Image: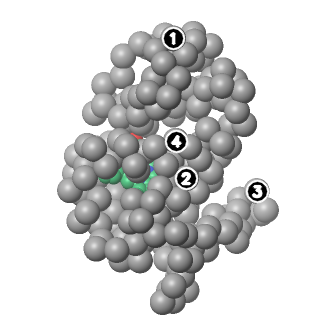
Amino acid sequence: MYGIINKSMEELVKSNFGEAKWHDVLQLSDIKIDYFVSNEPYDDEITYKIAIAISEIMQMPLQNVLFVFGEWWILKTTKEKYGGLLKAGGENLKEFLINLPLFHNHIMLMYPKLTPPEFKVSDIQDNSIHIHYFSKRVGLQEFVHGLLSGLGKLYDVEINIQVLASRDNNNDHEIFSISW
Ligand code: HEM
């Protein structure tokens, strides 16, 4: 994944727990890179190793780390760096979610070697929607959960998120039901 993802996790750790904890994370993950370049692609393995090391050092389940990182990615990293792009995604939460399937097409213009997630939407009602998440990557369900929760906070809407189906239960993708 592009360095911006790893850098964002670095900022999450440094802002919440201090520089020393990030140093511990780097040491434990044994990745031997101490500076990430945002627009350079890195092995996915590195991102997973960082998340696992954070979970061990902070004594927090990996799933919680991924969720917290999802919210951080929306509310800190992309809001600060790509606020205009986020705004262009929709005037309200529902519009943003309906547009989500096309969202990473815009990102690919900036990050051409992106391997983006795939989203589909269904069951669109006045106060709810189903988001279908497809990815070649495994284990990121709670990251998506956190991203969706972050979007609710971004748009200042109280939302309820339910996982209707998952690759953990023999489905070929995850389905999130979101209501507000
Ligand atoms: C301006 C906002 C955003 C930017 C700049 C951005 C950029 C990126 C980048 C660089 C990656 C790494 C992929 C790679 O390097 O191959 C990524 C992955 C991902 N993004 Fe976004 N993204 C944004 C918003 C969102 C939103 C709103 C969602 C969904 C709610 C989302 C869902 C994901 C997921 C799930 C992945 C993991 C890849 C996978 O599942 O295979 N992103 N994004």
Q: Amino acid at mark 3?
A: Asp
**Residue shown at 68%/43% (left/top)?**
63
Q: Report the residue marked by disc 1.
A: 20
Eye-nearest disc, 3 or 1: 1
- Please give left or right for residue 125 compared with residue 77 in the image: right
Q: Are marks 3 and 4 in contact (CB under 8 Å)?
A: no
User: Mark 3 or mark 4, which has the lower sequence index?
Assistant: 4
* Vertical comparison of 130 with 141: above or below: below
Q: Using the image as rendered, state which of residue 171 and residue 143 is in the foreground.
A: 143
Q: Report the residue marked by disc 2.
A: 146
- Please give left or right for residue 96 compared with residue 149 in the image: left
User: Mark 3 or mark 2, which has the lower sequence index?
Assistant: 2
Eye-nearest disc, 3 or 2: 2
Residue behind label 4 places its C-beta within 8 angstroms of ligand 1? no
| CA gap, disc 4 and disc 2 | 7 Å
Q: Using the image as rendered, state which of residue 121 and residue 160 is in the foreground.
A: 160
Q: Using the image as rendered, state which of residue 39 and residue 178 is in the foreground.
A: 178
Mark 4 lies on a secondary structure that is helix
Q: Report the residue marked by disc 3.
A: 168
Q: Position of residue 49 (x, y in %)?
A: 59, 26
Q: Are marks 4 and 2 in contact (CB under 8 Å)?
A: yes
Q: Quick check: can you spot residue 26?
A: no
* Vertical comparison of 22 with 132: above or below: above
Q: Are marks 1 and 4 in contact (CB under 8 Å)?
A: no
| CA gap, disc 2 and disc 1 | 26 Å
| CA gap, disc 3 and disc 1 | 35 Å
**Residue shown at 70%/62% (left/top)?**
166
Q: Report the residue marked by disc 4.
A: 69
Image quarter for residue 177?
bottom right
Q: Using the image as rendered, state which of residue 157 and residue 11 is in the foreground.
A: 157
